[in-house]
Amino acid sequence: MTQDSQQIFLDPAIRDWVLIPIMLVMVLVGVLRHYATQLMMSMPKGNFRGVRESAALMRARTLRGPPGTILSYEAFMARVRYLAASFDKGAYLKNPNAATAAANPMSDPAGMEAMMDMLKKNMVMIVPQTLIMSWITFFFSGFVLIKLPFPLTVRFKAMLQRGVDTADMDVTWVSSLSWYFLNLFGLRSIFTLILGQDNAAGTDMNQMQMMGGMMPGMGAAQPMQQPAEILNLFKNEKELLELAQWESGLKGVELRVLELYGERSPELTLDEKKRA
Amino acid sequence: MAPTKFNATTAKAKLAALRMGLVEAGASEHTQPVTYDPSDVADLASQLLATSLNPVERLAVREQAFIASLDSGDLRAASAHLSVIEKQFSFDESVRVQRLHGLLAEAHGDFARAVEIYSAALEKDETNVLIYKRVVAVLVSQGKRAEAIEKLVAYVDAFMQDVEGWTELAALYLEENMLPQAQFCFEELLLLRPQNHLYHVRYAEVLYTGGKFELAIKHYCAALELCKDNVRALYGLKVATAAALAARAKIVPGKGSKGGRGSSTSLATKDAAAEDEAVDDETIASLSAVASKRLAALYEAGGKEGATSHSVVKTWLAI
């Protein structure tokens, strides 16, 4: 397939009235979307009891972790007993009657809010995209806009010539709909230039997937977490607390300090360890 | 510090360091430690605001200038800054601006108004840590320590990982002479920041005051291990070792290390714990000797300026 076998001349008007406008519209819509999301985003509202709940879990984790050994035995045991007891009673749960409540995220106002936020975000993404796509398919379907300056294999035909069902055309020609898709995924770095690093303009596949698991700050629990799950977390933590071993983290500090000041040779300690 | 030559970049860096709290984070290893001097900050900030800044940083500097003017008592400048900020974020919208208004009211001495603003702000955002702290601070500056403790306990019950909260609570308890409670707070602080020798020292001081000399010795030693030649820890060690030896001599001369320990826990672990914590008299005596030696050496190294304090310390150590 040689170059001259397909001498197609494109009208410069196509460049001026189709190619550039599509790109321009895409950029503008991206910028608009960025500002629309900023407007619609409600501040992630913290929940006092939610913070308390996750803080309690974290506290238990620190206690049975390495820092716990620094406490004296009585202090450590008092904390373990207290936390285990209150975990057992569910004193730190966000809603203490969660065990009996229906496992429906809709019933939790906080979960509801998070879902609304996600819905808003998706709406801002999807609505302009469908509009632009229908605009392009309506006005410019079947247009060939540019020719790529490098050869490509036939496999790219589906990607670059969407909307143009011609079997013989060279792969390097790009149709209007494909130009739209190229823009959709390729404008990210341009948006970063215009709007800065954390913009909401582009569509990133990773981002879309992440959105489901994203957590609001302050170390709060996931918005979609089921109450029953949290109850299990607490039960688990309680068992781990009860199994927690205490060993003084300050064992032999005095001897180490004496060594530090050269009042005692390190060999002696080794000897003592053997004896012990 | 006379601003003979105003350098925008260094001013920016200094203000940013103060704002972000890089000083506390220990990032000042290669940079010079920055100290907070309100009038200096207000000065730098107002000069910086005259230059071109990006809008986000401009607001941040403006807020910093506002707080610095409050700290240096220049209330009129503070109100001017606040009204500029308010042009961008209205009082009703932004909890942060509400907090600034509360600060201004506090500076004017209008505590009732400040509390009113804060409680309204907390209704809007019930997890705003800064505002909780302000409420406590208002109570403290009014001298209502018991109420402040009450509020702070409720706060710390939810924000259990907040080091500042525990520190303040410990300080309040100490002012009220509630030693066991203060001890609890310091234990929490040690859990959260086990590598901070200052918490070890302060915990040990509380323990010593409460008569738990052996555990106090442990924590003084831990502090010395983390920060060699910490004078406060050395003094503490000296005093605590003397007290521990005296206490032991009173009970049973020789092996009397079981005194003063808590009660009723499961047997096996309890014994192991006791063994871990036991320190023999010999070690305590040599610790005491080390503390005296180091203290004397440290003051001697102070040279001529420390001559008087050196002699004072020497006589104290001789007792």
Image (tube, rainbow, N blue to C red):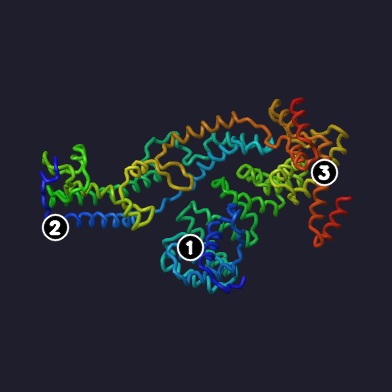
Q: Quadrant of residue B37?
A: bottom right
First of labels 3, 1 by sequence position: 1
Residue at position x 80%, y 45% in the image? B240
Kindly check if marks 3 and 1 are in contact, taking CB atoms under 8 A apart as contact: no
Kindly check if marks 2 and 1 are in contact, taking CB atoms under 8 A apart as contact: no
Residue B64 position in % (x across, y down): 52, 64
Residue at position x 59%, y 49% in the image? B163
Q: Is residue A228 above or below residue A204?
A: above
Query: Do the dots labelled 2 and 1 sit on one chain?
Result: no
Q: Crowdedness of circle 2 by 10 Å Cα count: few (<14), some, many (20+)?
A: few
| Cα distance in 3D space between marks 3 and 1 | 51 Å
Residue A77 position in % (x across, y down): 65, 34
SS label for mark 2: helix
Camera-side mark, 2 or 3: 2
Q: Amino acid at mark 1?
A: Ala
| Cα distance in 3D space between marks 2 and 1 | 50 Å
SS label for mark 3: helix
Host chain of mark 3: B
Residue A164 visible from this viewpoint: yes
Residue B232 position in % (x across, y down): 75, 51
| Cα distance in 3D space between marks 2 and 3 | 93 Å
**Which of the labelled discs sits on residue A12, or is there none?**
2
Residue B151 visible from this viewpoint: no
Q: Crowdedness of circle 3 by 10 Å Cα count: few (<14), some, many (20+)?
A: many
Residue at position x 43%, y 51% in the image? A45
Residue B59 position in % (x across, y down): 46, 64
Give left or right: position of B28 versus B280.
left
Q: Which residue is mark 1?
A: B60
Host chain of mark 1: B
Residue at position x 52%, y 53% in the image? B129
Q: Which residue is mark 3?
A: B288
